[in-house]
Image: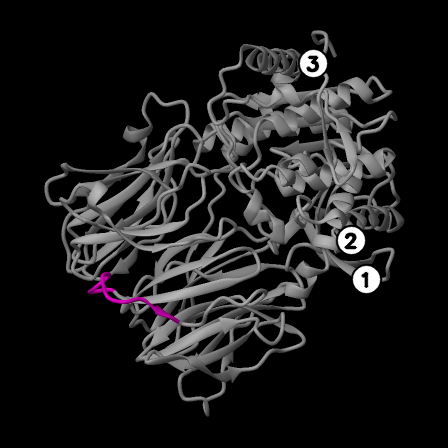
Amino acid sequence: MTETKPPVATTRPHSFTAHGVTIEDPWAWIKDPGYPEVTDKDVLAYLEEENRFFEGVMAPLKPLSETLFKEMRGRIKEDESTVPQRDGDWIYWTDYETGGEYPRWWRKPAAGGADQLILDEPALADGKEYFRLGAIAASPDGRWLAYAIDDNGSERFEVRVKDLDTGALLPDTIPGMLSEIVWTSDSKGFLYGVANENWRTDNARWHRLGDPVENDLEIFKEEDEGYRVAVGETQSRKWLLVSTGDHVTSEVYLLPTDNPAAPMVCIAPRKPGREYDVDEHDGTLFIHTNDVDPQFRLVTASADNPGEWVERIGPSKHFYMTSVTCFADFFIVEGREDGLDQIELHRYDSSIAPVRLPFPEASYVAGIGDNPEYAIQKIRLGYESMVTPGTVYDYHVATGELETLKVQEIPSGYDGGKYRTERLKIAARDGTEVPVSIVYPKDFPRDGTGKLYLYAYGAYGYAIPPGFSTSRMSFLDRGMAFAIAHIRGGDDLGQQWYHDGKLEKRINTFNDFVDVAKGLIERGFTHKGGIAIAGRSAGGELMGAVVNSDPDLWGVVVADVPFVDVLNTMLDESLPLTPGEWPEWGNPVEDKAAFELIRSYSPYDNVAPHAYPPMFISGGLNDPRVTYWEPAKWAAKLRATKTDDNILVLKTNMGAGHGGKSGRWESLKEAADEMAFVLRQLDVD
């Protein structure tokens, strides 16, 4: 492989002292002091030099990358469309034009009539390097469409309002929005929230159509800088919801949808460690909460006396309740039993036994889908597994029939019989059994000679679902296996699983991942050095930790927008996310023990002079979640410290944010580059 010479970032003396410890950070200059504006010439020059090196490394891989892109694109239906769904007097859906990067939004009258294009994303994105549609909501009377766009990846959205009768845009424009959009029942206004100067949504506001934005009524303001405010509504659309909270505590307020200026009703004042969310049926609040058990329970209360809770469904040792949705004649409880998705239909008459929907596979993903209406007799569901393409069903409540509406089409062809999937349990070093979902070709060797791609996240209580991926097939069809490690830090096995991978137990997350890899080696799926590993964001932190601790296990590492400068970030209260992140990672500003723990595993701070495997690192210049300098500083320190000649590349998207490039084909090209890099480093044809 030929490539240009790797860049070498200069060092500049810089240090700081916390809790009596002095930290040297000679690459601190890569953080532009003017952020979020990045104009420092030295910073930009370094990032551009890294990007040129990346292009040089990838040049010989272009034929492979293009082949992979064509394979992956060939598995995607170019004129894909969603299953239409009724909402009031209209039926809504989206579709793609053949070759289109972005979808179009359509509707037609439920009573019959012509299709109407209500939002043309390709036109909005035309000429832009980046485009992302955020919140979108039609008014209850169907007259207005409010939507939010981001054209640089900074996640500072601009709200616009369209008259769907005339197609004209109203002068109402709201910059800096970072929330959902929820209409009032009279269709004359909506609730939203804007980001403050630190990119924190600390407010809920009411905009009335035609009024100057500066006159919008602030109906709620959060004073705790660690909390974020969100707006929503109950399924019945009788109540508006204003929620505030951090990663472990929540507080919810009710407002009538016909009068947002009415006094807000607090359901239950914030109590540290207590989370709850709310739906409503016929004047009764259904409150999903972890107040007595991390597995959650369901309680009810009168809307007139919301603080008086009565248990409806108690917590279960094996069933982790994740959500409750109220419809006119029944309510749906979703959760996971031993890590597998479950959907239960409950009648409001508690004497009638609930119905659990059956799913046949050993490992799968299932959940209720787009169900905007309140009074329904069939429930829209989604289902997939690692070998079953995405399927949309309607479950008919009266008969129990599961009607197939759509199965994901793979134009280039798909034969599920070519693959096998298993759900394994591998013991971590402390004896805890960690679930692993794995898919592989049916003739995959189990003698230790195979190559394997291992993915995980392990933070914020986010479970990685064992779903279907058309892109993944390019690995499988080249003889590789693909595994997901459901490590602690996610809530795959319940909220306690999450708690056991955060704060002072954070090391469990890293150990679980390493021990899963070793267990897969012991079971003959692969061998040391035959494993590609990948994670993004907090999963990128995981990559940084395990490549420091066990570098010889991995054949290649992909770390996308990696949260690796953990200590510096958690010490910087001015950064957008930091105060709200302390419940997840600890507060090293005030807590010396948290400082020492984070310092002990922070990937950037623990780069050591030893051999590292080949590494692919990415970042986004406009990323507000993991700021661009985290991957950039990490790459610079790795280059200066590691003792090997293995390739390391850093790619910074100069016009994008946390999610990389926008558009379905542009993002697929990025995926193809990463895959080509992995295949080449593992010497897979």
Query: Which amino acid type is marked by label 1?
Result: Thr
C-alpha separation, residue under disc 3 versus residue under disc 2: 33 Å
* Mark 3 nearby-residue class (10 Å; few <14, some 14–19, many ≥20): many
Q: Residues within 10 Å of mark 2 (few under 14, many from 20)?
A: many
Q: Main secondary structure of the magenta part?
A: loop
Residue 590 shown left or right of residue 97 in the figure: right
Position of residue 324 relative to residue 509, above or below, is below
Q: Is residue 219 above or below residue 535?
A: below
The residue tagged with tag 2: helix, strand or loop? helix
Element type at mark 1: loop
Q: Which mark is residue 469?
A: none
Q: Which disc is residue 508 wearing?
A: 2
Residue closest to the eye, 304 or 286:
304
466 versus 555 height, above or below: below
Lower sequence index among marks 2 and 1: 1
Q: What residue is shown with label 1?
A: 432
Q: Could you give the CA–CA distance between mark 1 and mark 3, rounded to whole angstroms?
A: 42 Å
Which residue position is annotated with label 3?
9
